[in-house]
Amino acid sequence: MDLFGDLPEPTQTAGGGKEQTSQLVVEERGEKRKREVTEELEEKKVCKGLARLQGYVAARRGEREEMQDAHVLLPDFSTCFPSMPPQVSRLAYFAVFDGHGGSRASRFAAEHLHKILAQKFPRGEVENLDKLVKRCLLDTFKQTDEDFLKQASSQKPAWKDGTTATCMLVVDDMLYVANLGDSRALLCRVEQDGQDDSRKCATLALSKEHNPTCYEERMRIQKAGGTVRDGRVLGVLEVSRSLGDGQYKRCGVISTPDLRRCQLTHSDRFVILACDGLFKVFTPEEAVKFVLSVLQDGTVEWKEGQTAEEGRFEVACQRLASEAVRRGCADNVTVILVSVHF
């Protein structure tokens, strides 16, 4: 599948060696362009109404002996960057990692993936930032996987941990979601005006599940010499893409994420990032409606120092995770709720 099929082709540069334009004219145009870019950036930073994002997290161990999930909330991700492209005004990052076989892979990804992303992110004035961001995400996942596998193989005995990953990078008001495995990202978008949000909100999928029973995933595994039994790789691993899981890499399990992008609009209310523990007992639409019901609950009490809106989002996040356990989910449950305000 062409991950960049939705992107325009890179701008073709004119062949070098032609001296039809003097160096002086080129320099004058360059200086003019720099002034224009500076003026545009100054105007954007003053006038551009970026969405305000606030993240909330809830984690429940369920009936597991160990919490193998990990998460990251960085609403101001720019603090991790030595420099950013001048056309970027805001960066944010949120991620959920659902570990299996132990918690080392999920903890490693939570600690290192965003740092690698910051190192690889485009710097300076660039063209086609969209395509560079997507390439950056692909390279980041590849290096994170390689770094963990190197550390895992150096241990005695070697670590066999693996983890899913659902990461959302926000560049100004563009969402880039990169995911591996069966954790998910959802966006709640209002479809029409009115007072009953439960009837006017659409649930948009921002991620794709990687299950070995899916045709494309199964074909890749079989071509690599692996098998799918009882819906699992070699009858054991439930996901067909992951970070870590070194013993399954030869069987077609890969660390290449699916990438999706979505422009935030004034109709958007919130994003949910969650591990599969939530979706074992909630459909995506049910999860969105549950959050909306709490946001509309006028009896919700909030902590001192919070606004009413912040309090409702905090309570909605906590209640959603608790309800998953109450409904019988024995797995770890981690939910990140990101509010969107313009």
Image (cartoon, rainbow, N blue to C red):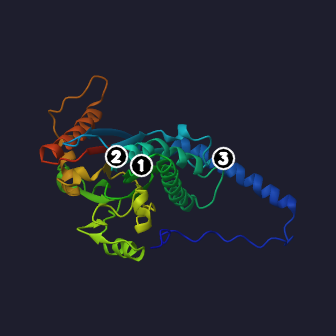
- Identity of the amino acid at label 1? Trp
Q: Can you tell which mark lies on residue 38?
A: 3
Which residue shows up at 60% across the image and 46% down it? 84
Of the residues under marks 1 and 2, which one precedes in the sequence?
2
Q: Can you tell which mark lies on residue 305?
A: none
Task: Place residue 79 in its image quadrant.
Answer: top right
Q: Residue furthest top?
A: 304
Please state which of residues 228 and 21 is positioned toward the viewer in this rendering: 228
Which residue shows up at 17% across the image and 50% down it? 196
Q: Secondary structure at mark 2?
A: loop
Q: Quadrant of the C terminus?
A: top left
Q: Quadrant of the N terminus?
A: bottom left
- Identity of the amino acid at label 2? Gly
Q: In the displayed structure, would residue 9 be above or below residue 184?
A: below
Of the residues under marks 3 and 2, which one precedes in the sequence?
3
Looking at the rendered image, the disc whose residue lies closer to the viewer, 3 or 2, is: 2
- Identity of the amino acid at label 3? Thr
Mark 1: give few (<14), some (14-19) or many (20+) Cα within 10 Å: many
Looking at the rendered image, the disc whose residue lies closer to the viewer, 1 or 3, is: 1
Alpha-carbon distance for marks 3 and 2?
Answer: 49 Å
The residue that mark 2 highlights is: 102
Alpha-carbon distance for marks 1 and 2?
Answer: 9 Å
Q: In the displayed structure, would residue 84 be above or below residue 217?
A: above
The residue that mark 1 highlights is: 159
Query: Residue 61: x percent and y percent?
Result: 24, 40
Count of picture labels:
3
Query: Residue 175: x percent and y percent?
Result: 43, 54
Q: Secondary structure at mark 3?
A: helix
